[in-house]
Image: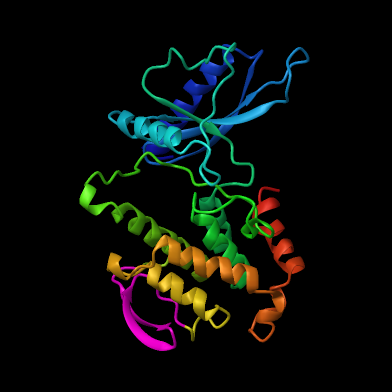
Amino acid sequence: MDDTDQRARREAEKIRQYFRADTTNFKFEGMLGNGLTNVACKIKFRNRWWRRGGSEVFVVKRSFRPNQEEDLRKENDVLRTLRGAMHIIQPYRIRENIRNPLDNAPGTSVLMEFAENGSLGDFVERRMEWHHELPNRMLLRIFRCLMIGSFDPRDREHDLFPVLKLIDFERARDYPDPNRRDLGVKDNIRGIGLVMAWLIQGSREAAYPAFRTLYLDNGHTEEILSYANLSPARFRNLDTILRNLIVRSCAVSPNERPTLEELDEYLRRMIDGATSRSYRHFPRGQFETDRRIKKLLRHLVLDASD
């Protein structure tokens, strides 16, 4: 066990001791994992016969290295700012009449909801263990799902795919320069594109240096320098329009990336219009049906922890 793991386990034990002080209301359920600086633990708020509502599970995140408090404060700020966003993990608030066992703990704590279906990062990791291309109709819904805050939650991207939430905002960045208001958006579009490329490749394949690749634009072949290397010869089942959107989203030049509005228009139209019959002649067209997608979904998401 290296030094990082030892520090994480010691901090997890401290968290357990804090919540042991109130076993009437809380149960420490274990350590979920850790990064280089922080540890996350799962806590249950116990339901009691005299209280309304059921038990609730939430996550506590704390740093086990010095000089990391600013990152956790930043994460709390981001969670508060994005409170209510469908695809952002939500801050957890202990009920007003219950004392928070961490009130006297030194430093900063982050309390957030527990993602029942797992996070987007969990799904990427599970995809890497599955050695086949994902169905296009699933990829389209994931792509639009990643465009957080830009659509109505009743839209169709969730008819075949559950809500997966983004977590870990301690290193989120602000772009305060008023003359570069879209830089953060362009950066996010590249990040979304890279996640999509990983899901298609089945690995976090190195995207640097960038690749010169061709894509179709209104019937014309264009060349672009992109971090996504999605060769049609290698990914024969991938929808051409979907490929073009991902390649452009990962363009080295921010000016060559599509806008959120453009992505939204394409993906809405494709989700609404693409049926299983649309892909019946694709190499893996038999996996584009609702039944097959839902079965794969159970395997990769809903039953992944069994």
Q: Is residue 212 in the magenta section?
A: yes
Figure quadrant of the N terminus: top left
Give the percent coordinates (x, y) of residue 60: 50, 29
Give the percent coordinates (x, y) of residue 263: 46, 65
State the colouring used for the structure image. Answer: rainbow
Give the residue drawn at x 56%, y 18%.
19
Q: Nearer the viewer, residue 189 or 71?
A: 189
Q: Quadrant of residue 278?
A: bottom right
Quick check: 17 above or below 244?
above
Give the percent coordinates (x, y) of residue 2: 39, 40
Count of all numbered marks drawn on residues in the image? 0
Q: Nearer the viewer, residue 158 or 106?
A: 158
User: Is 71 on the left or on the right of 82, as rendered?
Assistant: left
Can residue 198 be seen? Answer: no
Give the residue drawn at x 49%, y 34%.
40
Give the residue drawn at x 54%, y 54%.
151
Q: Is residue 258 in the magenta section?
A: no
Quick check: 286 above or below 168?
below
Q: Quadrant of residue 48?
A: top right
Q: Nearer the viewer, residue 27 or 184?
A: 184
Can residue 23 be seen? Answer: yes
Quick check: 182 above or below 204?
above
Give the residue drawn at x 33%, y 35%.
71
Specify the segment rendered in magenta: 207-231
Give the percent coordinates (x, y) of residue 54: 73, 25
Quick check: 167 above or below 66?
below
